[in-house]
Image (cartoon, helix red, strand yellow):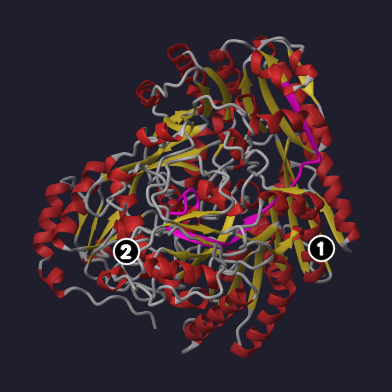
Amino acid sequence: MAEVITPSTPEQLREAIGWAVGTNSPLEVFGSASKRAFGHAVAADHVLDLSKLSGVLFYEPEELVLSVRAGTSLAEIQAVLREKNQQFHFEAGNFPGLLGDGGAENAGTIGGLIATNLSGPRRIKVGAARDHLLGFEAISGRAEDFKSGGRVMKNVTGFDLSKLMSGSFGTLGVMHTITMKVMPCDEKTRTVLIACDDIERAGAAMTRAMGSENEVSAAAWLAASDIAKLGIDVASTMSSGVVGLRVEGPAPSVAWRCEALRKLLAEFGTTEELHTINSHSFWKSVADVMPFSGGTGILWRVSGAPASGGRIAAKLAAETGGQVMMDWAGAQIWLLLPGDDAKAGQVRQIAQSEDAQAVLVRAPADMRAAVPVFHPEDAALARINQKIRDNFDPAGILNPGRTRPIASDGGHA
Amino acid sequence: MLRMPEPNQNTLARRKDIIAAMRDIVPAIGGVIVDEDQLRPYECDGLMAYRQLPMIVVLPENTGQVAAILKYCHTNKIRVVPRGAGTGLSGGALPMADAITISMMKFNRVLEIDWDNRAAVVQPGVTNLGITRAVEHKGFYYAPDPSSQIACSIGGNIAENSGGVHSLKYGLTTNNVLGLEMVTIEGEVLRIGGKGLDQTGYDLLGVITGSEGLLGIVTEVTVRILRKPETARALLLGFNSSEEGGNCVAKIIADGIIPGGLEMMDAPAIKATEDFVHAGYPLDVEALLLVELDGPKVEVDYLIEQVGAIAKACGAVYSRISESEEERLLFWSGRKNAFPAIGRISPDYMCMDGTIPRARLAEVLTGMQVLSQRHGLRVANVFHAGDGNLHPLIMFDANQPGELERAEEFGADILKLCVEVGGVLSGEHGIGVEKRDLMPEMFTKDDMKHQERLKLAFDEDELLNPGKVFPTLHGCGELKTLHAREVANKFPDIPRF
């Protein structure tokens, strides 16, 4: 019979995994299950629910360090950070809301965030979740305790297993303690908007902005129809597609850099500026991929070199008939397809021709069972990845099938 | 005393055959070094206390040759020690009597500068500063700047995950690498990452960076390049105690200011450097902060004032702001010459590299003075204050019997103290052989086994850089055994539904 195991201490977690190893019982591991609709379904009878393994262990704002149990909700963490005017610099959006799994109100847990290595618009400047994980403690698929990293900013003591755990989808070990680097919120934020309907030209505008010395902390392009959904008057009244370029920092510097960007990019189209509240609102919408959330349409995320973004996005839109949105200065393209065909062959072929990778983010369960959600790996890398998996979870009891359709998951059914 | 794995007699007996095989793979003149006098320069890296002549040194020129060498070594079970510029401070490139040292310094070309994607593709033997030199004419630079940047190679930086004085704001090597080409011990060429940001599978780019040559040999590197900030200015701030100095660092950061550089020196370090370079450092303070702000001029001028005000509130008794580029460089000249300055007042010195939570600084410095008296050796401190990375410089005289050993014991005690207060053994120099045997201070047996499991996924026969990082590498048979626990149906405390 299926069981839901809900440990509330690291010791209980170790016992649970020990039981699973001892009885060869595969486990589906999650925090709040907010991203369950992302990736492949897990082939496991039992569920390891970490939502009770929660709480802040310590938070030292002056040291820029926060340590929490892995099941702590992001909502709770954000409230704690907000009190001290701090944040996770990589600003992951509400990804669960995007999945259309009824989870819009549940932004997930810190463990889930690390396990999927999510990040938002600021990634182009400060990296992803993996760049902000200082250390962790976990129980591996061998039911053994292990840790790596620590609580300090600069640490090269031993292999950097924090990177290994980031984006591992709970297939190597189950983290119970997570220590993060946090950063102060900037004094000022503004966003320069440039009217631009042409996707390739928008890509070129972002490339020019990123190559300038204005320390742009986010660069995105939205089509006119998507801009209209943001509810930001200054942007809507431009009545066109819009490139957004965010500038953050001390007030005089922000004003100076916005001015410089408007001059630099004037030839691309008319420019406008969003100030504090509108600027925050704009980037929250980009982080949440708000124009494409709330529906059930098939959604792809294509990631390649930023300067190729305009060309890739234009090609994807033209050849699939889908709608596109660009983030990360072109390195991340969201593609919303019409109809119920994932067009996986076509999307992946376009991605591959540009040295990019395509991930099927939102699709019905039966489609995700048939189409590899994650971009197919190079064979040599796949072998190394499989060996790592086998060494950390030899019985294949942690999230079997989560990252690859079960038939090709090295036989760990 | 440092113990390394026993040389494999079988390998030593086959030295001639191995040389012939290497010459077949790398036919260039000077590509295979076998004579003792020519092997001598390779006997150590920047950690000169330990020396060992390599069996032979090979200098491949392309990825194909590296693959062929490693494949041969894998087939014939011959150990390999990868080597970059040899500037490492933890002995990561210390040779072995039965190993081929593979020097990557012929991989010295910049392959591509992709301005639009702000990326540089270079071979691993290109120096850290060489990357900046290749892009600075268009106003770009490569951010991580270890103090050896004029000599150290980017391949070595990948191996050690090198930092530098700007890492608080701009990150370590790992945050600035986009892609790698790496050859495995089996001779397989892996391409990982690239100019984009995401890749399916585990974050191999992340684990290879900082893996100290234990996972493979990197043959190509793609790094992010940044626009050089328009301007930079520095402040010198003096305090009557390290507590006050540390407090000022905390306040600056708590106020949301992340300086490009944030360095601290204690009184012995201030005195030694001032006597050496005459940077104008005050000699009547206990702690000196060097704060550098970079960015657009308007931002820098604004922040300089803010930092000045914070320092005043924190009790700074000395404050000087650089008014010109020359003056800024003069401020830095002291800090950047701290090591040679110590070298002037002591026949030998040993540089440690722990990181601590910043709030524990005063406590650690006090503890260090106690240890200094106990071991009868002087110590001076330079400190990447922003990120808590300490560089205690232990002064000793290797010609006095027993002093090297005492210095090593003192160093180990300092690192144990760092770990005790929640810090780590190494902030940026790596473990290598130097701190290898201290790893159990920080990690349990199971922690280490999981690190080894990563190692074994790449190199089952433990041929790549043996004797480094791990105190004792378990045979892979032992590690691969699954210790299934007898705990079936036996976890009473866990809520179930």
Task: State the quadrant of the N terminus of chain A.
Answer: bottom left
Residue A272 sits in which quadrant? top right
Say which of B421 and B95 sits in front.
Answer: B421
Residue at 51% from the left image edge and 38% from the top image edge: B224
Residue at 62% from the left image edge and 47% from the top image edge: A108
B302 to A261, vertically: above or below = below
B250 to A187, vertically: above or below = below
Residue at 53% from the left image edge and 66% from the top image edge: B426
Say which of B154 and A98 sits in front.
Answer: A98
Question: Considering the numbered disc 1 on the image, is that residue within a helix, a strand or a loop?
Answer: strand
Where does residue B460 sit, x and y in percent of width and height?
A: 26, 62
Where does residue A202 sit, x and y in percent of width and height?
A: 59, 16
Of the two numbered discs 2 and 1 in the rendering, the one whose residue sits closer to the viewer: 2
Mark 2 highlights which residue? B465
A355 in magenta: no
A179 in magenta: yes
| Part of the protein shown in magenta | A166-192
Amino acid type assigned to the residue bearing label 1 in the image: Gly
Taking the image as shown, residue B404 lies to the left or right of residue A212, namely left
Q: Residue furthest front?
A: A1
Amino acid type assigned to the residue bearing label 2 in the image: Asn
| Number of callouts | 2
In the picture, the disc for residue B238 is: 1
Residue at 58% from the left image edge and 10% from the top image edge: A198
Residue A19 sits in which quadrant? bottom left
Say which of A284 and B161 sits in front.
Answer: A284
What's the chain of the residue with tag 2?
Answer: B
